[in-house]
């Protein structure tokens, strides 16, 4: 039993040591304007590198962009990042995506997500909730490059489509499972 406790404490210390430098303190203090600019740039970059994402953007009621999410884990993991809700191309709100996980995982990663909210119900759910756990509200589909290539306007049946982009580093299980999206109010 003492060995288990020591291993657990060592593992948690390692996760804290690896995770702490990944989430810059400045990120929490970013202005609304800075988050909006970074979000718009990230969306344009996604549309440039993955042209099929334009189909989703064209049919979406709103787009929620998280330009930089930091994820780290070693058995236990965590992730966090701030983003902007764009409605008709204009910033209409700001959100934080955060989550934790447990299981086989090891690594550090910085990536982004663009969530295309395809209908009024998904947008309404996001705006009315004080934070929603992904998977408990509107239906969400994660799109990889192959799935985007097969999409067309008649196959867009989910409430939200999520595109991960700019993956860097090693991390198994890139998913929105276990994440919560919460409104924030940057200055």
Image (cartoon, rainbow, N blue to C red):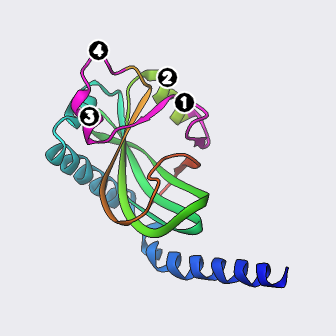
Dot 3 lies on which element?
Answer: helix
Tag on residue 125? 1
- Mark 2 vs mark 4: in front: 4
Asked whether the viewer can see residue 141, the reply is yes
Q: Residues within 10 Å of mark 1 (few under 14, many from 20)?
A: some
- Distance, label 2 to label 3, CA atoms, is 23 Å
- Of helix, strand and loop, which one carries label 4? loop
Please give the residue where the numbered disc 4 appears in the rendered image: 154
The CA distance from mark 1 to mark 2 is 6 Å
Contact? badges 1 and 2 (CB < 8 Å): yes
Q: What span is colored magenta in the figure?
A: 128-156
Q: Residue at x 78, y 84 (%)?
A: 3
Labels 4 and 1: the sequence-earlier one: 1
* Label number found at residue 121: 2
| Residue toward you, 144 or 65 | 144
Q: Judge depth for marks 2 and 3 and give the one in front.
A: 3
Within 10 Å of the Cα at label 3, are there few (<14), some (14-19), or many (20+) other Cα atoms?
some
Taking the spot 14% from the left edge, 46% from the top edge, the residue there is 48
Discs 2, 3 touching: Cβ within 8 Å: no
Residue 177: x and y in percent read 54, 46
Task: Please provide percent x and percent y for residue 53.
Answer: 23, 36
Identify the residue position indicated by label 3 in the image: 148
């Amino acid at each position: 039993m003492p060995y288990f406790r020591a291993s657990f404490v060592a593992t948690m210390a390692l996760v804290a040591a690896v995770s702490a430098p990944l989430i810059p303190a400045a990120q929490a203090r970013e202005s609304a304007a800075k988050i909006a600019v970074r979000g718009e740039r990230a969306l344009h970059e996604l549309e440039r590198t993955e042209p099929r994402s334009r189909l989703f953007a064209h049919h979406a009621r709103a787009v929620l962009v998280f330009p930089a999410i930091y994820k780290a884990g070693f058995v236990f993991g965590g992730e966090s990042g701030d983003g902007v809700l764009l409605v008709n191309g204009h910033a209409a709100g700001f959100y934080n995506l955060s989550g934790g996980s447990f299981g086989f995982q090891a690594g550090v990663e910085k990536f982004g997500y663009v969530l295309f909210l395809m209908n009024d119900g998904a947008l309404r759910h996001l705006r009315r909730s004080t934070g929603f756990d992904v998977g408990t509200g509107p239906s969400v589909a994660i799109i990889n490059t192959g799935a985007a290539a097969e999409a067309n306007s008649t196959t867009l049946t989910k409430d939200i489509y999520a595109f991960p982009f700019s993956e860097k580093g090693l991390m198994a299980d890139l998913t929105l499972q276990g994440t919560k999206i919460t409104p924030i109010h940057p200055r």
